[in-house]
Amino acid sequence: MVPIHRRFVDIEGRQVHYRIAGSGPALLLLHQSPQNSRMWREVMLRYAPRFTVIAPDSPGFGYSDPLAQASPDLSAFGRATWQLVQALGLGRVAVMGMHTGGLIATWLAWAHPEAVSALVVDGYAAFTPEESARYGDAYLPPFVPTWDGAHLRWLWARVREQKYFFPWYDGRAQAAMAIAPATVQASHDAVMDVLEVGDHYRVGYRAAFKHNDHHWLAELRVPSLLVYRRDDPLLAHLPRLAALPRQVQVVEEPGIPSMLLRLDQWLAATLAGEPAAAIGPAAPPVPQRWRRVIAETACGDVAGWLRAGPGPLQVHLHAPASAAFTAADVAGFDGPVLLVDLPGHGASCETEATLDAATMVDAIASFVGTFAGDAPLSLRVHGASAAYVPGLAERFGASLRSVHLHAPWLLTPQEQGCLLDNLPTTRIDRAGGHLGDAWQWERERHLLWPWLPPAANARRLVDVPAPARVHANVVELLRLGPRLRALLQAATPPDLAARLRALPLPLHLASDPVGDFAGRAAALLSGHEEA
């Protein structure tokens, strides 16, 4: 099997994530809304033996930064895609897109016919001005986390509904679709697509709905194949396509398998004379500017943020089962900084590895070593990431100069058992109940110590966390799924306090009494220096 690699590229300070596999003529795959390049995995594996297959995350989706405009149109998405083609040094490229991605691909073929060798669109959205006016706000209500988690119940119902009616909010028989309902797993996956992108889900949809001037299609000059599947609600748009150039072919297929069989032949014939792609060298990093980085480790790709520069490197580890850090979280720190998305979290989430302590330490150490060079290290760990400190201290040796602990979890065996016994369910429920359970657990762990039975002595007299913070952490809980228990079990060993106290290097504590359960973190400072 040809491996799929993940990369980031800096385009005028905007970080763009893409996947790449194979060799041969370049084939660019553009995803639908609100998904990301992950949707193309099987297609990439299918075509990587014959083509250099590249699947980017559109701006604001997946792990790519958004565009500066609040409401970019399709041509803005198209120009951003063209910037990526140029940044990768692709002279010629075939482009294939689905739904929103198909419209972006059409713009690319229309605007740069000299560089686009072929165009494939899976479901061209030929919206009319009337539909653009009718959908819009009704189709795209704001997605804002609420303290009671009601936004999750709404999202589950909305995702289920979109397989019954188009548009999803129109419950009339005239809008009903005779297609198979989504499986429970497919509904969960669709919910995750929206949870990961948040309210930005509206941006891609809005650009597609507003596009009702189809002159790009009528003016195409490259070999093009427009495919409509019978299980696609956009099949109703097929009769709207008229007066197309002779090099544009429109076909109807029963479903994805037959479409791919057709593409096998069409792409092979159309790209037979195209040269193999040669990806250009990456631009050198700009000092003192944040950039996304990614490295291959034994447990899969690990990602993070790096601000390079001279001097000791500060390495920040967020708490397991919580959201990864961004540059805004470390705004007060000077000098070079490396933020690690823990394996299974953030942009490092795409791993099937068991997230035990040894695996986490190996992956973190490998990732840090890729970017640290010979620089001395300062380690700043949050919450249960303290469990990785002894292993990292052994791996880094003399290069690790200090450790800063932020509210470490230091539990007894009984407390660990209580924590594990009361974790949220990871079983996907047909009514979406697992979403609400994750939300309730995450919300209440800020108000109660999660390793104590719910009682007055477990109550934490603190401000409520912002719903956006709870939401970001719930996304990580849902990503982890069944691995959550093993992750937190490995990250809360009852002997952790003794192991930390035995470390032959300075320990610093960044935890106020309210955040220091039973004063245990402060007790670690006996014989160590406090920050």
Image: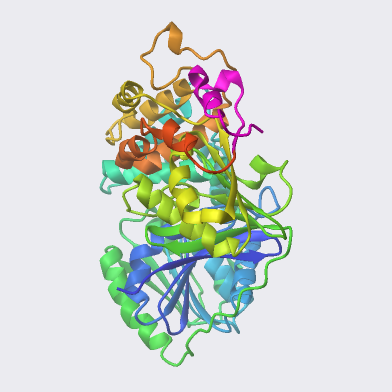
Q: Does residue 475 appear in the picture of this structure? A: no
Number of marks: 0
Residue 98 is a magenta residue: no
Q: Which residues are magenta?
A: 507-531
| Residue shown at 55% from the left, 42% from the top | 134
Instruction: Tell me residue 2's x, y (percent).
Output: 34, 74
Instruction: Tell me residue 167's x, y (percent).
Output: 44, 43
Which residue is farthest top? 456
Question: In the figure, is residue 157 to the left or right of 34?
Answer: left
Above or below, 284 against 378 in this view is below
Which one is nearer the viewer's eye here, 348 or 173? 348
| Residue shown at 60% from the left, 78% from the top | 281
Question: In the figure, is residue 62 to the left or right of 232?
Answer: right
Instruction: Tell me residue 363's x, y (percent).
Output: 43, 55
The N terminus - image quarter: bottom left
Residue 516 is a magenta residue: yes
Which residue is farthest bottom? 273
Which one is nearer the viewer's eye here, 98 or 490? 490
Which one is nearer the viewer's eye here, 521 or 290? 521
Which one is nearer the viewer's eye here, 360 or 113? 360
Question: In the figure, is residue 176 to the left or right of 370?
Answer: left
| Residue shown at 36% from the left, 56% from the top | 232
The C terminus - image quarter: top right
Specify the color scheme. Answer: rainbow
Instruction: Tell me residue 88's x, y (percent).
Output: 59, 75
Above or below, 437 against 454 in this view is below
Q: Does residue 503 appear in the picture of this structure? A: yes
